[in-house]
Amino acid sequence: MPKPHRNLVRDYAQDLRLFGSPMSKLGLVLMIAAFLVLPTVVQDDFWLSVLIYAGITAVGAIGLNLLTGYCGQISLGHAFFIGAGAYVTAKAGGDFGLPFPLWLLAAAAGGAVLGGLIGPFTLRLRGHYLAIVTLGLVFLGEHLWRNLDDFTGGNSGTSVDADVAIGPVNFADLSIFGESYSRNQGWFWLVWTLVGLVALLVKNLARTRPGRALQAVRDRDQAAEVIGVRAGRYKIGAFMTSSAIASTAGALFGSYQQFVSPDEWNLLLSIQYIAVIIVGGLGTVFGSVLGALFVGALPALIDRYSDVIPGVRTSVGDSGFISVFALNQAIFGLLIVLFLVLEPRGLAGIWLRIKTYFKTWPFSY
Amino acid sequence: MTTFLQNCFAGLALGSTYALVALGFVVIYKSTGVINFAQGGLLALGAYLGYTFSTNLAIAFGVAILLACASAALVGAGFERIVLRRMVGQPPFAVIMITIGLLFVLEPLITAIWGFDNLQVTNPWNIRTVEAGGIVFGVRDLWTIGLTAAVVVAFFLFFRYTSLGLAMRATAFDPEAALAQGISARRVYAVSWAIASALAALAGITMAAGPGGLTPSIGFIALAAFPAMILGGLDSPAGAVLGGIVIGLAEALTRGYQDQLFSWAGDNVSIIVPYLLMIVILLIRPYGLLGTKDVRRI
C-alpha cells in the first residue's frame, strides 16, 4: 500500500506533533546548524551583541505572548517583572554568589511570586481595567527600584556580577577542545539555548490540556467556565508563568549587561515587548522569536547607523530634527499601528501564507 | 490649618486638570468602548499648538485656546476617521494598542517640531497671585478651576439637552438599537473623539500657562489621569470629575505632608499615590465609585 501524502493528518497525535512534516524537520536542522555555526562566522562583537539582545527579548516576548496571545490578558506591566528578574540576579548571583542555574531559578521564582500577587486583580478585573492596573505596576515598580536602596542601589543602579558557568563550562570564557571563544560568542550560545528551551516549554504547554484551557479562556472566558474550565486558576497560572519567564529574561539581561539602573524598566520597555509580539504574531511562539529578531534588533541598528539615516540627531548640539530615542519610539508606534491595521497576524501570519502557497501549489490562488 | 487649605487648593487645581483629561477618556470609552491611551499625546499637541498661536503668532490668549482646542479636535476626529474606523469589531486589545501606537508617534513628532526646550507661554495670568485669608491663590489655578467647572457644566448640559448628546447617550447604551433608530454612529464616534481631544487640549494649555512652562513631558499627566478615570468608573462622566478631584487632592496632600508623614516611603511618593489609591479602590469596588457593574449573563 502506498504511503499517504506527507501533509495528510489522520489522527490527533499527528496533528500535535512539534515537527511533523519533513520540511519542518529540515527547518529544525537548519536552525540548529545556524545556532551552532553563526558565532564562529560572525565574530564581530556588535552583531553578536545585537543577536544576544534579540535572544533575550525573544525569551521575554515568549512569556508575554503566553499571557496575551494565548490567554488573552492584556499586560502593560512586563517591564516590572523584567526589572525584578535583573535585581534578583544582582542579589542572588552577585552578592550571594550562587551558581548560574540556581540564580536563574531564583529569578524565575521571584517573578512567579510577584506575578501571583497580581492574581486577585486578574480574578476581578478584565480587559481595560486590567491593562491600567498593570500600567500602574510599572510606576509602582519604578518607585520601588528607586527607593529600595539596599536591594537595587537606588537611582544610581547596581552592578550585576553573576557568573554564568555550568560546572566546568563557563559561557563568559568558553574554551572547547583547546579552542577559546569570546564572551559574546559564549553568551550567544547560552541565550539562544535558553530561547530554545523556553520556546519548547511554551509550545508544549500550548499543546496540552492547560494550554487548550488557556486558549478557551482567551476566546470566551464565560463559555470556558461553563464547560468546566476554572478560568480564574488558569488566568493566575498564566500570569505566574509569564512573569517567571519575564524575570528569566531580566536575569539574562542584567547579567549580560553587568549593570542595571531603574531608568531601564519603564513603560517604553513594556510597549516594546508588546510591539514585538504584535509584529511577530499574537499566539504563536515562532512569531515571538521573529518579532524579537525584527523589533528587538532595531534600537541597536538605529543607534549604530544613526549618522547615515537622514534627519537623525546623534548628539545634543547636532543638527537634525529627531533624536535616536525618539526615532525608536516613533518606529515602535508606527509598527504597532501598521501591523494591527494591515496584518493583525503579524510576521508569523505572513510566513504562514507563504508556507500555504507552496504547500498547495499548483493550486495556490 | 492654612497649610492644609493651601494644599487642598493645590489639589483642587491639579484635580481639575485630571478631571478634564479623565472626562475625555470617559467620552470616548462610553461611545466607542475604547480607552484612548493617546490622550496624553493630544494634550501635549494641544498645549504646543496653543503656544504657537499665542506666542509665535501673537493671537489673544482666549482665541488661541479656542484655536488650539479646535485643531486638536480635528486631529482626534481625523485619527478616528483614518485609523480607528477600520478597527470596528476587532478585540479591545488591538484597539488599545492602536491608540498606544498613536501616542508613541505623536510624542517624537512634537519634539521634532518644537524641540526639547522649556517654552514659556505668553498668557494673561502670568504668575500673579491673590491672597485671601492667609492662603495664596495662583491666578492661573483659579482660572483652571473656573474653566473646568464651566466646561464640565457645558458638557453635562450638552449631553443632557442636545440631540447630538442624546445620540451619544443612545449609542453608548446600545449601538445597534441606536443605528436602527437612524442615529449615525460614525458621526457620534467622530464627535466623541473631537470632544475628548478638545478637552485634552484645554487641560494642556492651562497646564502650560503655569509657572512650569511647556516641556515635552507635559503629556505625562494624562497617565496620572488614568487612575482618576478608573477610580470614578470607566463609563461615568460624573465619576471622572469626582475621580479627578479625589486623585488631585490625594496627590497634593501627600506632597504637602511628605516630609512629616511619608518620609519612610521614599522621595516623590506623591507620583505613585494615584496608582496606589486606584489599586485599593479596585480591590474593594472593581468597577470604580460610580461605574456600572459589568453584568455577565450565561
Image: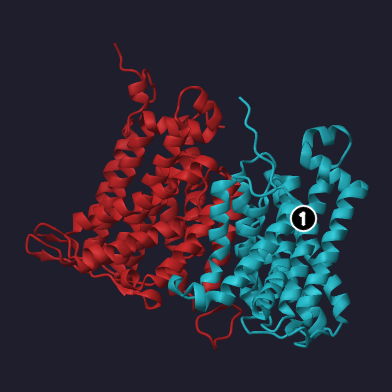
Chain colours: A red, B cyan
Q: Mark 1 lies on which chain?
A: B
Which of the 4 image quarters holds residue A258? bottom left
- Res. B72 visible in picture: yes
- Res. A52 visible in picture: no
B177 sits to left or right of A188: right
Q: Where is residue A106 in the image (x, y as percent from the top left)?
A: 26, 55
Q: Where is residue A103 in the image (x, y as percent from the top left)?
A: 23, 58
Question: Residue sitting at 78 percent across and 39 percent down?
Answer: B173
Could you say whether the residue bearing mark 1 is in a helix, strand or loop?
helix
Which of the 4 image quarters holds residue A5? top left
- A177 or A225, nearer to the observer: A225
Which of the 4 image quarters holds residue A200? top left
A310 sits to left or right of B135: left
Q: Quadrant of the C terminus of chain B?
A: top right
Q: Position of residue B82 (x, y in %)?
A: 74, 53
- B238 or B119, nearer to the observer: B238
Q: Where is residue B55 in the image (x, y as percent from the top left)?
A: 79, 85
B241 sits to left or right of A94: right
B207 sits to left or right of A310: right
Residue B95 to residue A303: above or below = above
Question: Residue sitting at 73 percent across and 85 percent down?
Answer: B134
Question: Residue sitting at 42 percent across and 72 percent down?
Answer: A146
Disc 1 crowd rating (10 Å Cα; few below 14, some 14-19, many 20+) is many
Determine which residue is flagged by label 1: B193
Residue A364 to residue B247: above or below = above
Q: Residue placed farthest to the left in the image?
A: A178
Question: Residue sitting at 69 percent across and 82 percent down?
Answer: B213
Residue A91 to residue A61: above or below = below
- A18 or B1, nearer to the observer: B1
Q: Quadrant of the N terminus of chain B?
A: bottom right
Residue type, numbered disc 1: Trp
Q: Residue placed farthest to the front in the image?
A: B1
